[in-house]
Image (tube, rainbow, N blue to C red):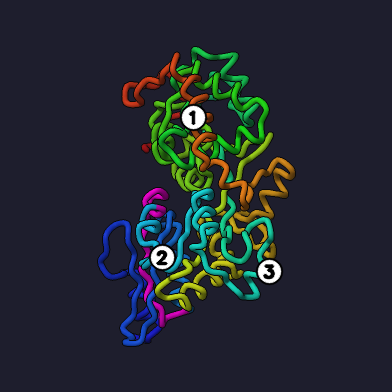
Amino acid sequence: MPVASLLTVWLLAPVPAPADTLHLVNDAADARPLVIYGVLDMPQMRPLLADFHRRNPDVDIVYHNLQSIELHARVRQQHARPEADVLISPAMPWQFQLANDGLSAPLETAMASAWPAWARWRQELFGVTFEPIVMVYRRDLAARMAPPRSHAELLERLEEMPEPLRGRVVTYDPRLSGAGYTYAVEDARISARYWALVEALGRSEAALETTTSAMLEGLSDGRYWIGYNLIGSYAQSYVNAHPELEIVVPRDYALVLQRMVMTLRDAPHPRTAERFVDYLLGEPAQRLIATETSLGAVHPGITGLGTANALRDTLGDAIRPVRIGPGLLAPLDTLKRQALLEQWRQAFDNHPPEPSASLTSTLEPTQEPASP
């Protein structure tokens, strides 16, 4: 069998590893290792790792898929002698904090210098995806009311139809989710009516979850009818396989997060780390992101579906990317965090949501939903 075919087979059947770890290796004695900590599920990350390995067969890759809090804690614990070379995470405030604290290394390449200024900090931290924060609703909701297509319309539905929607709207719990907390901070910054929406969610006994996956599962099985502030990349992949659900990018404004990549300052394998980050900024990787994942490509030279350019063409000024810069540190301020979460607590204390497991759907579907 040709060497290229052998490599392809090896990539399709990597060495056994835990479910949250992927190894891509070869038999070369002088192989260069690369260790990546990422907050990105295997189906989204695997095409990029496989393509990079094909282009760099001398590199052995170990990818650890972690929760954002776990990634941050590991890096802090390994401060002096890190295990990882590269970090990829959508927890933008925490990634920026690591870079701002001096744990990142600059990337001095032509592609790093040319990367859009709005998607990087110095040449140390780079946003490589463009992921809108969306709403998802059950298609059979239309039998009862017009599905909301903006934050303003969601507030209207909650104010005008509180009883039908009681316990049927779901969103992140910002007290337990770093992602949910980040979106709450950004929503409050952008919208003058954000706290009116939070109050309406509290009055309607909205359900609170800690992951987009949990919200999608509840929507699919009928416990929830409307989901607010879900990560668009995960939602799109799920909705593609669940025709009972519809995804909506809010038309009044749409938050956009970016998965931010950085090379650690004391990376054990700095040269391979630089090669990988430079690869993520290049057109081949960005085209893969646009076509083989639902993450959204940033590269300004790439157009069409699955790109930042396409989303901007559709929504124009309604696009609100979370800004990369010192402002990301504000949500981590203890007093500001306590103040925001206290407002959330007050909104929900008088109308605590029922446990999600006790909810049963009373919405009559217009068609038989697909199996979750």
Q: How many marks?
A: 3
Q: Quadrant of the C terminus?
A: top left
- The residue at the point 58 percent across, 58 percent down is 127
Q: Is residue 274 above or below residue 90?
A: below
Q: Amino acid at mark 3?
A: Ala
**Where 1 sits versus 199, above or below?**
below
**Of label 3 and label 2, which has the lower sequence position?**
2
Distance, label 3 to label 2, CA atoms, is 24 Å
Horizontal side of 313 relative to 220 (left or right) equals right
Quarter location, residue 47: bottom left
Stretch in magenta: 56-72
Write down the residue under mark 1: 341
Of residue 302 and residue 179, the one placed in the foreground of this image is: 179
Q: Amino acid at mark 1?
A: Leu
**Which labelled disc corresponds to residue 36?**
2
What's the CA distance linking mark 2 and mark 1? 33 Å
Question: Label 1: few (<14), some or many (≥20) within 10 Å?
Answer: some
Describe residue 108's horizontal placement relative to residue 313 as left or right: left
Residue 246 as seen in the image, left or right of residue 216 = right
Callout 3 crowding tier (Cα within 10 Å): few <14, some 14–19, many ≥20: few
Compared across the picture, whether 354 is left or right of 193 comes to left
Residue 112 sits in quarter: bottom right
Circles 3 and 2 in contact, beta carbons < 8 Å: no
> What's the residue at 48%, 63% (across, down)?
103
- Helix, strand or loop for disc 2: strand
* Secondary structure category for the residue under label 3: helix
Question: Would you name the residue on which mark 3 appears?
Answer: 114
Of pointers 2 and 1, the one earlier in the residue sequence = 2
Label placed on residue 175: none
